[in-house]
């Protein structure tokens, strides 16, 4: 598939799909990407149905561009306290160096 076909498939000016990032972005990023010609994406996997509707309404109020809604399609593994502690210990120097709180679960 070439760029022209891909853009036609997406309905966008650019052959770009913005990566949806659950927990760290909302419709604002998707709107910005859509306004410059890419396919904006709203991460919906951590949202309630009402929140998904609100995000879509915000997007539609700002643009009529195509929109990607991204949902999780896998089961999350059970929380592993020991693995979380290892990651926390590994990343602690970076958080300390940047003087930011590490809330890793």
Image: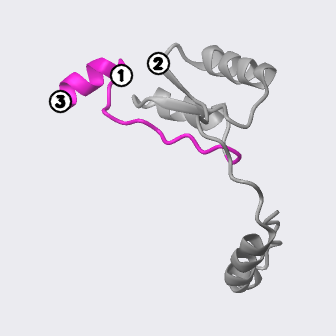
Q: Which residue is mark 2?
A: 66
Which mark identifies residue 95? Answer: none
Q: In this picture, which residue range is highlighted in magenta? A: 1-24
Closer to the camera in the image, 95 or 49: 49
Q: Are marks 1 and 2 in contact (CB under 8 Å)?
A: yes
| Left or right: 1 in relation to 100 | left
The residue lying at 71 percent from left, 79 percent from top is 86
Mark toward the start of the polypeptide (2 vs 3): 3
Please tell me how crowded label 3 is: few (under 14), some (14-19), or many (20+) other residues with Cα within 10 Å. Answer: few
Q: Quadrant of the C terminus?
A: bottom right
**Percent x, y of residue 99:** 78, 79
Please tell me whether residue 3 belongs to the stretch shown in magenta: yes
Distance, label 3 to label 1, CA atoms, is 12 Å
In terms of sequence position, does the residue under pointer 3 or pointer 1 come before the other? Answer: 3
Dot 3: element: loop
Whether residue 98 can be seen here: no
- The residue where tag 3 is placed is 1
* Mark 2 crowdedness (10 Å alpha carbons): few <14, some 14-19, many ≥20: some
75 or 41: nearer the viewer: 75
Residue at which label 1 appears = 10
Q: Quadrant of residue 101?
A: bottom right
Outermost residue, left side: 2
Relative vertical location of residue 55 with respect to residue 21 in this rendering, above or below = above
- Give neighbour class at mark 1: few <14, some 14-19, many 20+ (Cα, 10 Å): some
Q: Please tell me whether mark 2 sits on a helix, a strand or a loop.
A: loop
């Amino acid at each position: 598939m070439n760029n022209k076909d891909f853009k036609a498939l997406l309905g966008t000016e650019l052959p770009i799909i913005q990566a949806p990032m659950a927990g760290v972005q909302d419709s604002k990023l998707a709107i910005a990407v859509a306004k410059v010609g890419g396919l904006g994406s709203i991460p919906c996997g951590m949202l309630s149905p009402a929140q998904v509707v609100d995000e879509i309404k915000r997007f539609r109020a700002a643009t009529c561009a195509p929109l990607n809604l991204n949902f999780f399609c896998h089961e999350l593994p059970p929380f592993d306290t020991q693995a979380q502690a290892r990651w926390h210990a590994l990343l602690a120097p970076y958080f300390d160096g940047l003087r930011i709180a590490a809330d890793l679960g």
